[in-house]
Amino acid sequence: MKPSFTVSIIDKSSQDEDPLQLPQSDLISTSTKSHSFLTNYFDNATKEDWEDWRWQIANSATTLDRLSDFLDLSEDEIKSFDSLKDFFPLRVTPYYLSLIQKDNPNDPLRKTVVPIINEHIHSSVEKEDPLNEDEHTPVEGIIHRYPDRVLFLVTGFCSTYCRYCTRSRLVGHKNICNIDCIENAISYIEKNTQIRDVIISGGDPLTLQDFEIEYILSKLRRIPHIEIIRIGTKVPVVLPQRITTNLVNILKKYHPLFMSIHFTHFNELTEETKQACERLADAGIPLGSQTVLLKDINDNVETMTKLMQGLLKIRVKPYYLYQCDPILGSSHFRTKVEKGLEIIKGLRGFTSGYAIPNFVIDSPGGGGKIPLLPEYFIGKDENNLLLKNYEDKIFKYPDYL
């Protein structure tokens, strides 16, 4: 059976088409905080509804009126919707809304998903496609920048839209890939034998239905030269209910399979997210985090330390800390590069090495990821290297045979 690759999952009636009737033991259990939010805002919904990921998508906030049911919106936030119909759309799951402070416009999670008027201000350094992804698209749905790996965009849909999204030119506006696109993309991967690594992304690929996900994974795993498959997602953070036992059982059939999860702030480290990540880890799926450095959201050592250490506790290895890409309307999110270096320096030596991500810039123009480090190597003295440690003390290392 070929999947349709539509976003019909946002229609609750599509559940009737799902052959998998999941038992409650298969689902992510609801925390006390989530249950309180459910009873306060959804009079006619049950705990079983809340734990159904399709209900979460169907009941997401997508309009100003609906968002105002949950949050006391500021004048700035309200004004931003005047032009939203022609810009990046809004979508926030009820679960993620339950993590946001109702009366605080400066709540860190709120600032990542609720638009403000600055989003409509475009600076001269910003571009719709700053990474030149479109120029590295040989066939629809494939971005082929590095020789041995490709990015495979399988959907344009996310359950929650981050306002700083690198792919905001595509995501939420159209279905990036239909079934013909999927087939053509897989054919391209099959014909290019230098490709050994496929990163499945979008949109968020875990918003597809189970049989659609398995269809893609099974087709890729049949290609002899594909060594590893990666999935890029924010679902365990904004829609942990999606990580059902059935989904995990599908994923673990296609090892080696890795997952990169987009975390932003330690407020996302909830009981539900912990359950989702541990369920994935128990299935043998290595988990890594990808975090974007965001001004006045996570741009300090204390916040980043708490996030990175918290990730290790739920078995997620901090992988990348990204400098925010210069997409249109993102200047209020971006920090100076020095801020990222300051954070890495503040982590190094003061926490576990496992808790320190790689700080990278995805270089504008399509040059790929470039890692940045504080100045630990400061020169040479005769036959010695001069090295600075985390306490700014200078040490000599003999660099001769």
Image (spheres, rainbow, N blue to C red):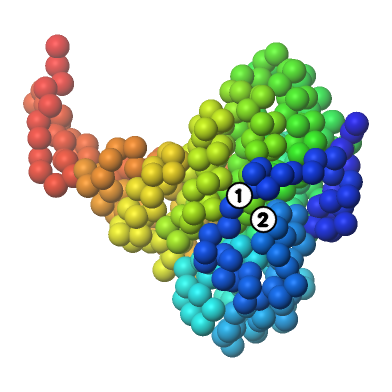
Element marked by disc 1: loop
Q: Nearer the viewer, residue 147 or 353?
A: 353
In this rendering, is residue 126 above or below 71? above
Q: Position of residue 67 (x, y in %)?
A: 67, 76
Quadrant in which the C terminus appears = top left
Q: Nearer the viewer, residue 335 or 378?
A: 335
Q: Position of residue 100 (x, y in %)?
A: 53, 70
Indicate whether 28 appears above or below 143: below
Q: Do tag 1 and tag 2 residues touch (Cβ < 8 Å)?
A: yes
**Coordinates of residue 264 in the picture (x, y in percent):** 48, 56
Report crowding for label 2: few under 14, some 14 to 19, many 20 or more residues within 10 A (C-alpha): many
> Which residue is identified by label 1?
28
Tell me: 357 left or right of 362.
left
Question: Residue placed at 44% from the left, 65% from the top?
Answer: 297
Looking at the rendering, which quadrant does residue 183 occupy? top right
Q: Quadrant of the N terminus?
A: top right
Image label count: 2
Q: Upstream in the sequence, badge 1 or badge 2? A: 1
